[in-house]
Amino acid sequence: MRDFLPLEKSVRNDLMSKIVGTYEAHGFQEIETPALEAIERLSSGDGGDNEKLAFRVLKRGEELEQALDSDAAQLSDLGLRYDLTVPLTRYYATNHAKLPRVFKAIQTGPVWRAERPQKGRYRQFVQCDIDTIGDETNFAEIELLNASLNALAAIGIDNAIIRVNHRELLRNSIAALGVSVSDSGKAMITIDKLDKIGIDGVALEMKDRFGDKVAEATTSWLSSLTKSNEIPELLHEIFTELDKLHPGKLRFDPTLVRGMGYYTGTIFEIEHPSSGSSIGGGGRYDGMVGKWLGTEVAAVGISIGFERVAELVADSPTSSNSLVLVFESENRQAALSIQAQAIAAGYLVRLEPTPKKLNVLLDSLKAQGFASFAVIEEPQRGFEGLKIKPIA
């Protein structure tokens, strides 16, 4: 979990504003959900390994005392959300009567996982999601992928590629290897390690789990794949439409798994040549909303890993409209008035009493993102009388 200095926070705010602004321009609407969710929802079996990483919150007061007195009672009743999808499904089930038939949501905010801290992995990090609930057609995926590529372009990331697969295709491929339906989940976990351990490593693990024949079939299957795999009919519409808008940005990857247990159809992962990990991903989770609503509802979403894209984007330049106003103590009231005038003119304005060494003050504030300054020499002339200069 990290602290952010003012300039870092300003850069992050700018990035988030551009991403959210792009999503809003595509017709998605921003919502907000609490940091805490019922532990039953966070451990319902749909969150994959992330459920093991959930921070649990102890019961409080009398409920905690009763739980401590009972060997069978659970000590926690709430947990910090480990993603934004589980809270969204609860939110929709609670508020669906007030929402449009097809609901297009933006949700941003921190999530928490009890990760082992290391480069690129944090215990608190920000996610930025868009989801469409209530549209069972491929057009929902097309809109999500289009908006996400445009959002990345808005923050200067133009060379991202989205790998796409479908859980049905993946299940069929695994069945063709000789793995039973009941064991397909274990096979997916192994195949998901392909980027880390290679074909030989995957085959060896499949051998340990399922025997020689499955291992041989796995080696043959993975060795036959190329980066130009033919697009299957199930995904053809998505690729055709997106290629018109973003040529060459989608790549069919028949080995793409995505770790969450709740995915039911199309899955996607965003990769970037300068990142050692994916910078986003998502997929269709048609069976999840119904758990809380009692009626099946189609749903699909995608998340941009905000921390990872923030690391890819160079720091934004110092804001050109940030201004330091230096004033003598007897001109304090005039300084407040001129500050209001400068703000009305579009400036971000910091007031500073005249220091002993002006250059030391300006050097310090330049490091915090301030671009220009002015000394209030003729307070009666107001904002128009200022001589605004860049901080050298």
Image (tube, rainbow, N blue to C red):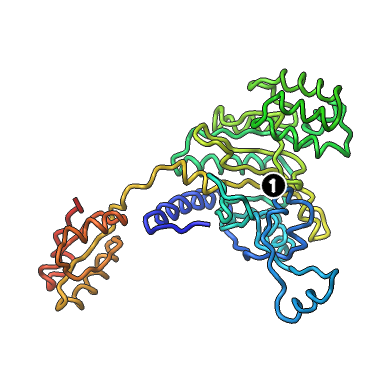
Q: Residue at x 27, y 70 (%)?
A: 340
Foreground residue, 103 or 358? 358
Above or below, 380 against 129 in this view is below
> Quadrant of the rendered structure where residue 369 is?
bottom left
User: In the orientation shown, which residue stands out farthest toward the bottom?
Assistant: 62
Residue 8 position, x and y percent, is: 40, 54
Q: Residue at x 18, y 66 (%)?
A: 326
Q: Is residue 167 left or right of residue 151?
A: right
Residue 100 in sight from this viewpoint: no
Name the residue type under label 1: Val
Above or below, 14 against 341 in this view is above
Residue 170 position, x and y percent, is: 77, 32
User: Is label 1 in a helix, a strand or a loop?
Assistant: strand
Above or below, 371 against 325 in this view is above
* Number of disc labels: 1
Q: Residue at x 44, y 53 (%)?
A: 12
Task: Name the residue that disc number 1 marks.
Answer: 300
Q: Residue at x 81, y 34 (%)?
A: 171
Foreground residue, 219 or 175? 219
> Quadrant of the rendered structure where residue 333 is?
bottom left
Q: Is residue 312 left or right of residue 49?
A: left
Foreground residue, 326 or 234? 326
Residue 390 in sight from this viewpoint: yes
> Quadrant of the rendered structure where residue 107 is?
bottom right
Residue 339 position, x and y percent, is: 25, 69
